[in-house]
Image (spheres, rainbow, N blue to C red):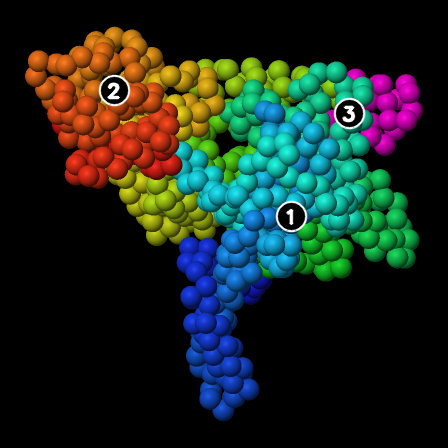
Amino acid sequence: MLANHKGEIPVVVLLMPWLLGITLGISFISAVYLPFLLGAFIGLSIVFIVLNLNYQRLKIYKRRWLGGLLISLILLAAGWISAISYNELNNRHHFSKLPSPYLSVKINNEPQLKNGLIRFTTTVQQSINRKQATAVTGTLLITLKDSAAIGLQYGDELLVPATYTPIDPPFNPAEFNYKKYLAHQNIYHQLFLYPGQYRVLQHNKGNPLIAYALKLRQQMVAKFKQQLHNPDAIAVASTLILGYKADLSNDVLQAYSKTGTIHVLSVSGAHVAIIYFLLQWMLGFLNRYKYGKALKTTVIILLVWYYAMLTGFSPAVCRAAVMISMVIIGNTFVRYINMLNILAISAFLLLLYDPFFITDVGFQLSYLAVAGLIVLQPVVYKWVTFKNKWVDKLWALCSVSIAAQVITFPLSAFYFHQFPVYFLASNLLIIIPTMIIIYSGLCYLLFSWVPILSTLLAWVLENTILFMNKALALIEHAPFASIGKIWFTTTEYLLTYAFLITLFYFLYDKKPWLLRLSIGCLLLLCISISIKRYDLTNTKSIAFLNLRKNTGLVFKSGNNAIILSNLADTDKNYSYSVQPYLDSNKVSNAKLYDLKQGISTPYFKKQGNLIQFYDKRILIYNSELPNIQLPQKLKTDYLYITGNPHTDLHQIGKNYDYQVLVIDGSNTSKLINQLEGEAKEMHINYSILKRNNSLIALSN
């Protein structure tokens, strides 16, 4: 499972401080730390060199730990420096620091069409002001609502107005942090354009190799569309074989996600490994010749990287290609090499190229999964012994799935908040279909020009995909197919890993202190989850959510919730902003109502526009509220203005006495600015939801 001594895995040991340095660099990314870190790096390096030159005279051999400590600190500083230096905002030539009317940009990825919008990222090249161009840097996300833009390709240069805006942060609790996700790709600004707001300057100005790879992939996707008829089959074939995900439907994604097989739809190590084994078998005859082994290694590596090019050099495939290349070279030219070392070397090379890869979920999951196979699979495999050869092979496959699932469970639960109960059955089910799909798909692409053969291969490919989709759909809808609403805090996430690692280490080493530590971690984890669950069960709260131009109020009482919104529960905005809030609060019974409906429950009553939730009273002020003078002022805790009514706070104050004014995003900017000015003048406590965080209020 593990190395007998850390000397067997030196790269793994050295990688740890490097990873810690990058993590600290991403957490503390400001350039103000750079002079101190550079000074520390240079100083520590000089001390290390001096100590090595005077190793005998200073008797450093009596303090062997000193060298390891210095190397760790040097690598930590280097990792921190690399993360800060890679951050584009720390570059003084970033386009956001040089305001101008126009920008010259170059498309640096494949434009994607979805829901009538074309989205792509660009490298900003020039800031243009009064016909004077200044060289700048930075990445800009552009979204076009223009049917003519479908012809845009990687490498095209555009002239666009510099009306970009910062990426919005998440406004609601538990909402996906899109701003953080893009920041980890060095994207901090976005631009939305309509027809006529941009101009194409030049075509085909990108990297020729990447341009050729993307064009080749488009041709391959077009070939799938020629003889495959089912849209889902075409989408899965394009995704699974070529890494082209633009056509995948949400239903297919959900089926693979809930059954724990979503990794199949990401062209990565497993896919490259399948191709590697096929090439290894096909070129096995070369082992009989003097230089055949070296020739076979060279051919396989070249073909693996050609496959990476076929997929458009997607990050996941490049990651897998680097890993498999290191494995092939290690197995060919070295008698013994620890696989963890190879894994660490490939990770180091990738992070040297892009330190922000460490934040990528795919990067984390793929390396953890491979590490789990290397470290945990032998332990799991030894749990049970079978004499029957075929049963033993089946158990070997099961041990692979268990090891990968165990090591990635805390991370996948932390990000995706669910656990597939039948992961073992679903992963065993897809092994043979996946191999058939990859082999038949690649053969179809190679022989698409042969009429009868290509038709047969297309039939095999399409029907295998449809069979796999139907089988996974059955598993998805089976009772208790997945455990959802898993919301780990960072502490709980780390405790889960500590529990699993110490438990498996105990099963390997049988040291009692490891078992005690594992049980201790599990106990702390259970206490943390229990306290959190108790608090959520006994919490009563009102959430005024920021749903952009829509209305959303959530009244939570323990595990129950009443939602008032103009959105349907199938709406994308509801799934993106409302459902995560409910899930993170362990709401098991949620009822959605329209704002016009009357409601009466033991803890919630709504009549007209007036709401009573326990001891809190809320008035919904919209255009449907009768504009009449009340005999006396109505006292409320919250006055919620929505739907852009024609009013002002002086008029409202004649009828209503309220403690907090809440203004949502469905109101126009003009009305919001007017009400904000009046609230400041009248010293009223107010909250504006448009482009601001939601308001969460607790009730007694």
The spot of residue 423 in percent (x, y) is 53, 27
Left or right? Give the position of 170 relative to 384. Answer: left
The spot of residue 412 in percent (x, y) is 48, 37
Front position in the image: 66 or 611: 611
State which tag comes first along the sequence, 2 or 3. Answer: 3
- Farthest residue, direction bottom: 57
Give, as a single range, the part of the protein colored magenta: 435-460
Pointer 3: residues within 10 angstroms few (<14), some, or many (20+)? Answer: many
* Label 2: element kind: strand
Pointer 2: residues within 10 angstroms few (<14), some, or many (20+)? Answer: many
Disc nearest the viewer among 2 and 3: 2
Disc nearest the viewer among 3 and 1: 1
Return the residue at label 1: 105
Residue 456 is one of the magenta-drawn residues: yes
Which residue occupies 52% across, 62% down? 92
Front position in the image: 257 or 354: 354
Which residue occupies 26% across, 37% down? 677
Q: Is residue 301 visible?
A: yes
CA–CA distance between discs 1 and 2? Answer: 46 Å
CA–CA distance between discs 3 and 1? Answer: 33 Å
Which residue occupies 64% across, 29% down? 146
- Farthest residue, direction left: 632
Return the residue at label 3: 224
Residue type highlighted by circle 1: Val
Q: Are marks 3 and 1 in contact (CB under 8 Å)?
A: no
State which tag comes first along the sequence, 1 or 2. Answer: 1
Tell me the tag on residue 621: 2
CA–CA distance between discs 2 and 3? Answer: 55 Å
Left or right? Give the position of 670 relative to 123. Answer: left
* Label 3: element kind: helix
The spot of residue 122 in percent (x, y) is 63, 46
Quadrant showing the C terminus: top left
